[in-house]
Image (cartoon, rainbow, N blue to C red):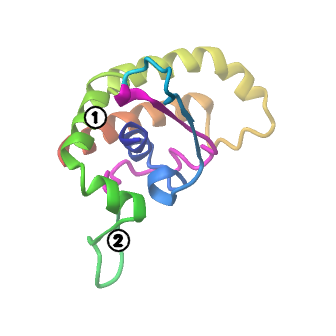
Amino acid sequence: MLTQGAVEAFTMGPDALFSKGKNFLFIDFADASSKIDPLNKRLYIPWDLDSVFVSKRSDGDIYGTLKTKGKNAGELTQQAYQEAILNNFPERYEAIMATLLAGPLSPASLTAFLNALEVVLSADLELDPNNNIDGSIAERFDHFREWVTGRAVNIQGQL
């Protein structure tokens, strides 16, 4: 669950398990005959990912949402899961986030993935009349490469 929360914090999805307490499924592998590691007995699966990566900014907080306006600007607000789980297991959450940033969510890994996607998807995205992409496809991929790098730097600073 903390890993899913970390991934969702990275993508800044406002409509997810930790931010809204919804839009996920899980598979529970725990039963009497299971030989699965008890720490990995449940698999969380996100869905409804249409709101991830929508912010042009990459500076979201990994523990909640920072108010940006008014007299409480800079104040952190948290949803129920963020408050109950992240505040009680911050060291484990931060360790998971650091591991993800050093591996699958590292700028190098994500940039390589985006480079591969760009080669495979660009022609079809150019032809899609419903792509809703401002500018060129190449510019959008450049934006994502810059965004994931900026996001990783921002999170490193929070850790």
127 relative position to 87: left or right:
right
Please tell me which residue lies in front, 86 or 126.
86
Q: Which residues are magenta?
A: 38-64
Whether residue 117 appears in this view of the structure is yes
Q: Secondary structure at mark 2?
A: loop
Q: Which residue sits furthest front?
A: 32
Please tell me which residue lies in front, 84 or 121.
84
Among numbered discs 2 and 1, the one appearing first in the sequence: 2
128 relative position to 14: left or right:
right
Kindly identify the residue that appears in the image at 41 percent across and 64 percent down: 80
Residue flagged by tag 1: what amino acid is it? Ile
Whether residue 55 appears in this view of the structure is no
Above or below for 28 versus 54: above
Residue flagged by tag 2: what amino acid is it? Lys
Q: Main secondary structure of the magenta part?
A: loop
Q: Which residue is mark 1?
A: 96
Q: Which residue is mark 2?
A: 67
Q: Quadrant of residue 76?
A: bottom left
Kindly identify the residue that appears in the image at 50 percent across and 44 percent down: 53
Q: Residues within 10 Å of mark 2 (few under 14, many from 20)?
A: few
Task: Return the x and y of residue 107 as percentages of the image width and height.
Answer: 33, 27
Q: Residues within 10 Å of mark 1 (few under 14, many from 20)?
A: some
Q: Please check the rendered image and state whether residue 159 is part of the magenta-colored stretch, yes or no.
A: no
Q: Which mark is residue 24?
A: none
Mark 2 vs mark 1, foreground winner is: 1
The quadrant in which the N terminus is found is top left
Task: Return the x and y of residue 12 as percentages of the image width and height.
Answer: 44, 49
The quadrant in which the C terminus is found is top left
Q: Please check the rendered image and state whether residue 51 is part of the magenta-colored stretch, yes or no.
A: yes
Task: Return the x and y of residue 89 as percentages of the image width and height.
Answer: 24, 49
Kindly identify the residue that appears in the image at 43 percent across and 17 percent down: 35
Task: Return the x and y of residue 58 as percentages of the image width and height.
Answer: 37, 47
